[in-house]
Each structure stands twice: as C-alpha cells, then as structure tokens.
C-alpha cells in the first residue's frame, strides 16, 4: 500500500510543477507564433542566407522545445493522476476494511452506523442528535458494539483500526 | 466515509486548459470589444491568442485525461440526448465536456482559427510600425499603423489588394462577432449546467482549485 502522506505531498508538488510547465508552454507557443510570423516575412525578401537560415533553425528549436515541454507536462499530469488514484484506493481500501470488520462482528445496521460515527470521534449526544434517538439508546448501542468487537471502551475500539493501518504502513512503535 | 474521488470530472481541468481558456477569453474580450482593429495592440493580442489556440489544439492531441479530443468526440446523437435531458431538467455526469459543450468548444475553436488566419492574412507582420518610423512611445501602439508601408512591396496591385482585404476583413469580423455571441451562450450554458448539477463548474476552470467544494 502506498504511503498516503508522501503520495499526497508528491502529488501537490507535481501539480505546482504542472502549472509552471503550462505557463512556460504558453510563453513558448506565443513566442513561437510571433517569431515564425516575423521570420516568414524575411524569406521572400531576403531568400536563404545566413540570417534566414539561422531564423529557421531557431524556429525549429522553438517548436521542438514546445513539443518536449508538452510531453513533460503529460508525464507530470499522469503522475498526479496515478498518485490521486492510489490515494482514493487507499481510503477506499480502509472503508472496505471497516465494513468487513463490522460484518464479522455481526453489527446490526444501526449499530454499524453508530460505530462509524464513534470511529469518526463524535460524542454520544451528537450521534443521538444525528440519528434522532435518545442518548441512552446510543449508549446502549455503543456498549453492544464494544462487546461484539471485544473491546472494553471507545479507545480500544478505535485502536483496532489503527492497528490495521499501521500493519499496512510498516510503521512500528520502535521506528 | 467520503466516496472515492476517482472521477476525472471532479478534479477539474488541468492547468494548461485553464491557462489557454482564460488567455483566449481575455484576448476575445480585448480584441472584440476594446481594442479597435488595425491597431498594433489588436495585432499583438491576436497573435498571442493564436499561439494559445495552437497550444490548446496540440494538447487535445497529445494531452492527458479530459483535455484530449478523444474524451469529448463530437456526437450528434449524444448532443440530442443531452438536449432532451436539459429540456426535462435532468442532470447526467460527463467526465469531460458535456456533448453540447463539446460542440460549443469545437465551434469556438474553428471560428477562432478563422479569425486568427484571416487576421494573419491581413497583417502578416506581428510587429507593425507606424510608417516605418520608430514608435513614439507606448501610446502609438493604440493608434492605427500606416497601411501604406505594406504597399511598397505590393505596388501595382493596390486595387486588388484592397478588394482582398475587404473580403478577409468581412470574414474576420463576422467570425469574431459569432465568437462573442457563442461566448455569451457558453457562459449561459455553464450557468445552466452548474444549477442542474449543483456543482459550481466555474471552479473547475479557476486557478488553484483542484476539487469541488
């Protein structure tokens, strides 16, 4: 599994790079058009001499440079896309892990919803308000969730998922 | 849990699309409404816009994701279906341009090419000077440059030259006016699609925003 934090930083750097490349490319093509239009006027007047040959070479160099810039831009953007896909895959994978655990513990749909809210750090009162039930009901459902998942309290319950994440990231307490 | 953001449409347009879009939009407004034709600045802005247009068209061929022509092929049947959706106020997600939006983009590009090419045909010097003299400060760039300078190379066909310019000018102006009308329609279309989808589509074109709010 890719490291989400590092992937995100790289994607952000690549996005800045893409903006810079876009600016450079725009400048290059505009310069290209001006230069070629100007040089094209010299040919019928002067014909092929050192001056016009040099201008033609510069024109070719400008076009080739623009082409390479476009290719580099394309590479950068596909890297951003890959990084973003990896990220959404990672968050999607975590979502899947959570749902699988809930199913394994045999949570009812309302218990699963309460558990999800608890996992996101919501207070009992908030969960009750969101679900339109009494705080007592939420507390009872949470107790069921803890019992079924084999944890004593919310901290232990959450740590079940933290463990899952750390196992994948290769981050150990010793490191 | 937040849904995965894999859809290319949610990420917005890439920086090159945004840059060329606003650059050309600015040029159209400047040359269409503010700077009078024949003036040096009009010619400069036109050449710059031509460059940006060529870059965007190149990017349609070699670019990535939703910027590629292949991600929004012109299709009459898709456009008809999209029109039906609009009339029934129904929204559908498209990864790139909507089918009607694609037709708008291709039409605008074709008209921009016509305007650029007729413009270049009428003024093939990107740095027109006032009668060959050194320009007298920046103000002179806003004044009409001397057309007679052109004619020192085209003596003897003056009448023909004027006729040609007349027709080119006519095409240039008609296409430019069409662009202004279509641009207004384009803005209206974006407004309608934004209302329909509940997503501010302008954000996908603005600088610095990479995700829908």
Image (cartoon, coloured by chain):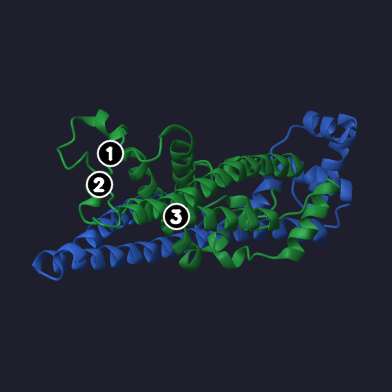
Chain colours: A blue, B green
Q: CA distance from mark 2 to mark 1?
A: 10 Å
Q: Quadrant of residue A167?
A: bottom right
* Mark 3 burial class by Cα count in 10 Å: few <14, some 14-19, many 20+: many
Which residue is situated farthest in the bottom direction here? A48
Both marks 1 and 3 on one chain: yes
Mark 2 or 3, nearer chain start = 3
Q: CA distance from mark 2 to mark 3?
A: 20 Å
> Image point 24% across, 66% down: which residue?
A61
Locate residue A161, reporting x and y percent.
66, 53
Q: Distance of mark 1 from mark 3, alpha carbons?
A: 26 Å
Q: Would residue B95 be visible to someone looking at this image?
A: yes
- The answer to whether residue B12 is above or below residue A52 is above
Label 2, on which residue?
Answer: B127
Q: Classify the position of the C terminus of chain A by image quarter.
A: bottom left
Q: Nearer the viewer, mark 2 or mark 1?
A: 1
Q: What chain is tagged by disc 3? A: B
Please tell me the numbered disc located at residue B188.
none
Between B108 and B71, which is closer to the camera in this rendering? B108
> Residue beneath label 1, please?
B145
SS at mark 3?
A: helix
Disc 1, SS: loop
Q: Nearer the viewer, residue B168 or A46?
A: B168
Q: Which residue is mark 3?
A: B53
- Coordinates of residue B98 in the picture (x, y in percent): 68, 55
Task: Say which label, 2 or 1, has the lower sequence index.
Answer: 2
Q: Residues within 10 Å of mark 1 (few under 14, many from 20)?
A: some
Of residues B71 and A139, the one drawn nearer to the viewer in this rendering: B71
- Chain at numbered mark 2: B
Q: Which dot, 1 or 3, sits closer to the camera? A: 1
Q: Which residue appears at 74% of the width and 59% of the height?
A: B79
- Could you tell which of marks 1 and 3 lies nearer the N-terminus? 3
Q: Nearer the viewer, residue A50 or B7?
A: A50
């Amino acid at each position: 599994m890719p490291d989400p934090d590092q992937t995100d930083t790289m994607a952000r750097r690549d996005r800045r790079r893409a903006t810079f490349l876009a600016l450079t490319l725009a400048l290059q093509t505009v310069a290209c058009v001006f230069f070629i239009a100007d040089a094209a006027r010299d040919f019928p007047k002067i014909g092929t001499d050192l001056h016009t040959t040099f201008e033609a070479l510069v024109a070719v160099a400008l076009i080739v440079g623009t082409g390479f810039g476009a290719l580099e831009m394309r590479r950068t953007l596909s890297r951003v896309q890959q990084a973003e896909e990896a990220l959404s895959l990672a968050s999607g994978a975590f979502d899947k892990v959570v749902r699988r655990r809930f199913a394994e513990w045999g949570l009812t749909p309302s218990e699963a919803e309460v558990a999800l809210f608890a996992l996101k750090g919501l207070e009992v009162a908030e969960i009750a308000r969101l679900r339109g039930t009494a705080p007592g009901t939420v507390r009872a459902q949470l107790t069921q969730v803890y019992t079924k998942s084999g944890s004593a309290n919310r901290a232990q319950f959450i740590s079940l998922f933290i463990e899952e994440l750390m196992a994948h990231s290769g981050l150990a307490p010793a490191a | 849990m937040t849904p995965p953001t894999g859809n290319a449409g949610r990420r917005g347009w890439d920086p090159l699309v945004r840059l060329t879009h606003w650059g050309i939009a600015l040029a159209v407004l400047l040359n269409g409404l503010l700077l009078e034709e024949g003036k040096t600045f009009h010619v400069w802005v036109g050449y710059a816009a031509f460059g940006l247009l060529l870059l965007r068209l190149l990017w349609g061929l070699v670019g990535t994701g939703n910027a590629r022509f292949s991600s929004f092929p012109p299709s009459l049947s898709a456009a008809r279906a999209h029109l039906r959706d609009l009339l029934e106020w129904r929204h559908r997600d498209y990864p790139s341009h909507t089918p009607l939006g694609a037709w708008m983009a291709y039409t605008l590009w074709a008209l921009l090419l016509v305007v650029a090419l007729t413009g270049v045909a009428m003024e093939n010097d990107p740095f027109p000077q006032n009668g060959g003299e050194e320009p007298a400060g920046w103000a002179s760039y806003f004044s009409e440059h001397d057309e007679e300078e052109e004619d020192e190379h085209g003596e003897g066909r003056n009448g023909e030259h004027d006729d040609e310019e007349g027709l080119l000018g006519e095409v240039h102006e008609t296409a430019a006016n069409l662009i202004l009308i279509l641009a207004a329609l384009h803005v209206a279309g974006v407004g309608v699609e934004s209302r329909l989808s509940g997503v501010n589509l302008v954000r996908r074109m603005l600088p610095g925003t990479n995700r829908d709010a």
